[in-house]
Amino acid sequence: MITFLEGILVEAYPTHVVLNVHGVGYHTLIPLSSYDKIPEVGSHFRLLTHMQVREDAHVLFGFASAAERDLFRLLINHVSGIGPKTALDVLSGVSVTIFKAAVVAGDVKSLSQVKGIGKKTAERIIVELKDKVGVAAAWEAASASHAPSPRDQEMNDAILALIALGYKQVDALKAVKAATDAKPGVEIPSDELVREALKRLA
């Protein structure tokens, strides 16, 4: 089992990266949440990985943080009907902190807005993950001490609103991030973020 890769970043796209590790290029699928943390091409980089062995292929999934990989594994191992592609969609559509807070709060509406997750799947995620021994207690403690900041929550709401309007996740993320970065240190309401992001997307 390959648990991490460390080498030179050769390619970096919103859906995958290629790492040169001692002359071998590893193609690794990633979520948007990790893409946002990846350095420039040519940089030395360490990527956490999860390897899926299938009859027709060995597929590597990469993550910039342990929290992202832990959530990915939790989803594919403990929630029926969720495979690696949907798990990547979840990580691409919502931060780990906000996802955990939504599960603890039983917030079906927020989860069901993520690409690939309908209302029934969101309900199943909440039921199946809350029932895991120690998960609910650990997440409640984490939510209390690391609850998403108002800024993070407004950004997440704006991204989900743009996705609901038909924009791709990567475009929505970039536009909202650009709108937020334009006013550093200022908490911008989600509706204003959506307006500013739409100007950039126009």
Image: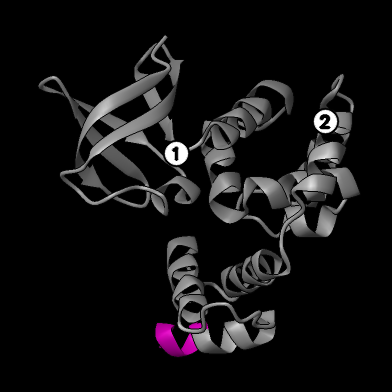
Q: Quadrant of the C terminus?
A: bottom left
**Image position of 127 (left or right of 43):** right
Overall secondary structure of the magenta stretch? helix
The residues bearing labels 2 and 1 have C-alpha atoms spaced at a distance of: 22 Å
Which residue is tagged 2? 138
Residue 199 is one of the magenta-drawn residues:
yes
Vertical relation: 180 (above or below) 28: below
Vertical relation: 114 (above or below) 163: above
- The numbered mark at residue 64 is 1
Residue 166 is one of the magenta-drawn residues:
no
Amino acid carrying label 1: it is Ala
Residue at the (37%, 31%) spot, across then down: 47
Residue at the (58%, 55%) spot, across then down: 93
- The mark nearer the N terminus, 2 or 1, is 1
Bin the neighbour count of mark 2 within 10 Å (Cα to Cα): few under 14, some 14-19, many 20 and up.
few
Residue at the (66%, 21%) spot, across then down: 77
Residue 120 visible in the snapshot = no
The percent position of residue 116, horizontal first and vertical second, equals 62, 49
Amino acid carrying label 2: it is Ala
The stretch in magenta equals 197-202
The percent position of residue 124, horizontal first and vertical second, equals 82, 37
**Image position of 144 (left or right of 14):** right
Residue at the (67%, 31%) spot, across then down: 75
Q: Quadrant of the N terminus?
A: top left
Q: SS for tag 1?
A: loop
